[in-house]
Amino acid sequence: MSTFLFVKCSNPMPFSNLFPDATDKRSQNTQGLQVGSPVPDFTLYNTDGSVTTLAAILAVKPGVVLYFTMWCPTCQVHMDHIRLNIRPVYPNVEYYFIDYISGTIAQAYANQVANGYTDFKAAVDTGFRLTDLFYGTMSTTIVIDKNSVLRMNEDFKNGQRLSDVLSALP
């Protein structure tokens, strides 16, 4: 017997419209910032209710990793790898799971808790600013160094590339 789960999203992403029309608000950006580009300061709205900026993070950390999640099984495998295998080797770097689908801090927090990631920082991209800036979708992994330079912008694969980039941070 098969079981199907249908989820109704009350705040769908602007680029999830299967029947686009003149109200399609997608960016024309199809790649996001390129590696080596300076990253403008941005604000992270954290699921714990706090707010921080890229500049504030990089004032005390040598870099930051952003992983775009939709809390699916594939994302969970990647997030577990980052939590259990990458973060312990590079503990001085800041890590955030970026919820780009929930739409609100409350819903992102509920998804974070429901999926067991209470030991990890998560933020919600309510205005799709980060999604647009990095063209971030499921499994997009971003590394920004202490000089606000983009060092990685690609889909997570097996963690080796992420480790290589983190080991080369200035």
Image: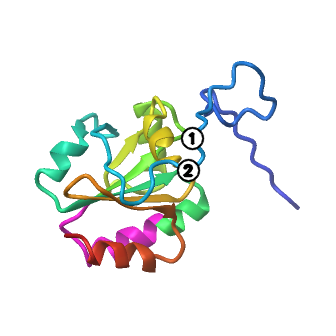
Q: Which residue is mark 2?
A: 31
Residue 1 image offset from top left, x and y in percent: 88, 61
Q: Residue 119, can we see it?
A: no
Helix, strand or loop for disc 1: loop
The reply to whether the C-beta atoms of the residues labelled 2 and 1 are less than 8 Å apart is yes
Does the magenta portion include 89? yes
- Say which residue appears at 47% left-offset and 44% top-offset: 99
* Disc ID at residue 29: 1
Viewer-side residue, 24 vs 117:
24
The amino acid sitting under disc 1 is Asn
Quarter assignment of residue 95: bottom left
**Range drawn in magenta:** 79-94
On the picture, is 125 further left or further right than 24?
left
Quarter assignment of residue 49: top left
For the C terminus, the image quarter is: bottom left
Residue 105 image offset from top left, x and y in percent: 40, 33
- Say which residue appears at 27% left-offset and 76% top-offset: 168
Most distant residue in the left direction: 60
Helix, strand or loop for disc 2: loop
On the picture, is 111 further left or further right than 83?
right
